[in-house]
Amino acid sequence: MKIGVLGSGAWGTALAHVARQAGHEVQVWRRGGPWEPLGGAEGLILAIPAQGVRDVLSGLKSIVTNRRALIIAAKGIEQVTGLFMNEVVAEVVPRAEALVLSGPSFAADVVKGLPTAVVMAAERLEEARRWAEALSLPEFRIYASDDVRGVEIGGALKNVLAIACGISDGRGLGDSARAALTTRGFAELTRFAAKLGARPETLMGLSGLGDLLLTCSSRQSRNYSFGFAIGEGKTVGEALSLSRGVVEGAFTVKIAQALAHRHGVDMPIVEAVHAILDEHRPPDQEIARLLARPLGPEIRQG
C-alpha cells in the first residue's frame, strides 16, 4: 500500500520507518508542504502534536475520500474544545475513518528495532485488525481494540501523570513516592475513563498502564524530563525551553482538569500538576496538599 505520514519529527520518522519495513510505499509530509503527493495514499498517519491536528486536517480534507483511514498517533486533548483527537477528525473530516495508535513506545527504540508493543483502535474491530496486521513487524507488535475512547484517554492522560512523577523525582522524593504517584495516578486515570464511557480493561492494557509505566520513570520521556526540570527548580518556561520537542502533557493538563470537574471526577494529582503549570504554584505547596488529603479506602466502590 501507499501510506502517508504527516509529521517529520521523531515519532513520524519512526512510524515511517515501520511502514517501510512492513513493505509499504511511504510518503512523508512536512509542515508547509503540498498535499497532492498524499492523494493516492490508502492510509494516513497523523504523527503531529495534538494541538496542531485540527489545522493540519483543515488543509488535508480536500484530498480525503470516503472511508480513508486516518491513523491518529498524537496523544492529547484539544485545549479549546475539550475534544479527543478522533472527535476532531470526525468533525473536520467526517468522510474518513479515524483509528488511534497508542501504547508504550519511544521513537528511538522503534527505529533501533527494539521490541515494542502498541495498540490500534477503531470503532470497527475488523478495521483495527486490518491496520494492525498491515503495520506490524516481528519487533513492533500491534494489538487491535474497538475501544477508541479508552485508548485515547490512556495516551493523553499518562503524559500529565508523567509530569507529576518527574516533579517528584526532581524534588528527590524517592522511588517509593514515584511508585505511589504512578499507582494513584492510574486510579485517577481509570476513574476518568469509566466516567467517559471507556472500558476498564482497556486502561489495564498497553495504552493505559503500559504507557504509564514507561513514561513515569524514564528520562527519554519528554513529559517526565519536563517535570524533573520543574522539580529541580526551573520555571515552567525554562523547563519547556529545555525540552527536545513538544511536551504534550503541558497542553493537556488544563483541559483534563476542566473535564474532570465537568464530569465530577476526583483527580487530585492532575489538579496538582495543573496548579503548578497553569497557576504557577510552588511544587512543594502542591506536594504538601496531596500529603494532607484525608485518608480513605484504597479501592472505591461504585
Image (tube, rainbow, N blue to C red):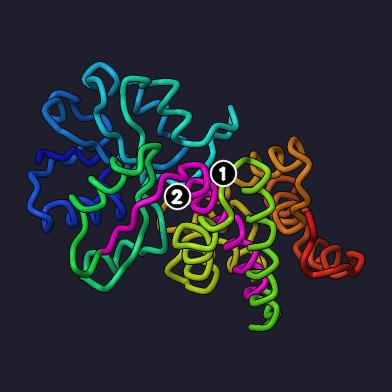
Work out whether residue 131 or residue 105 is closer to the camera in this orientation and state it: 131
Magenta-drawn stretch contains 159: yes
Location of residue 224 with respect to 86 vertically, above or below: below
Disc 1 on helix, strand or loop?
helix
Taking the view exactly as shown, the residue that stands out farthest to the top is 62
For numbered disc 2, what is the local secondary structure? loop
The residue positioned 79% from the left and 70% from the top of the image is 298
Q: What residue is pinned by disc 1? A: 251
Q: Is residue 70 above or below residue 164?
A: above
Residue 144, compared with residue 254, is above or below; it is: below
Q: Main secondary structure of the magenta part?
A: helix
Q: Residue at x 63, y 75 (%)?
A: 169
Instruction: Bin the neighbour count of mark 2 within 10 Å (Cα to Cα): few under 14, some 14-19, many 20 and up.
Output: some
Disc 2 residue type (three-letter): Val
Could you tell me residue 150's position as x and y percent? 52, 48
Whole-angstrom CA distance, mark 1 to mark 2, is 9 Å
Q: Residue at x 65, y 43 (%)?
A: 256
Q: Are marks 1 and 2 in contact (CB under 8 Å)?
A: yes
Query: Relative to 200, is 195 on the left or the right?
Result: right
Q: Quadrant of residue 166?
A: bottom right
Residue stretch in magenta: 141-170
Q: Give whichever of 244, 165 is nearer the camera.
A: 165
Q: Is residue 196 above or below residue 90?
A: below
51 sits left or right of 235 in the view: left
User: Does residue 286 appear left or right of residue 156 in this picture?
Assistant: right
Instruction: Name the residue type under label 1.
Output: Phe
Q: Disc 2 designates what residue?
A: 246
Q: Residue 134: give x, y in percent of width and height.
A: 18, 50
How many numbered markers are drawn?
Answer: 2
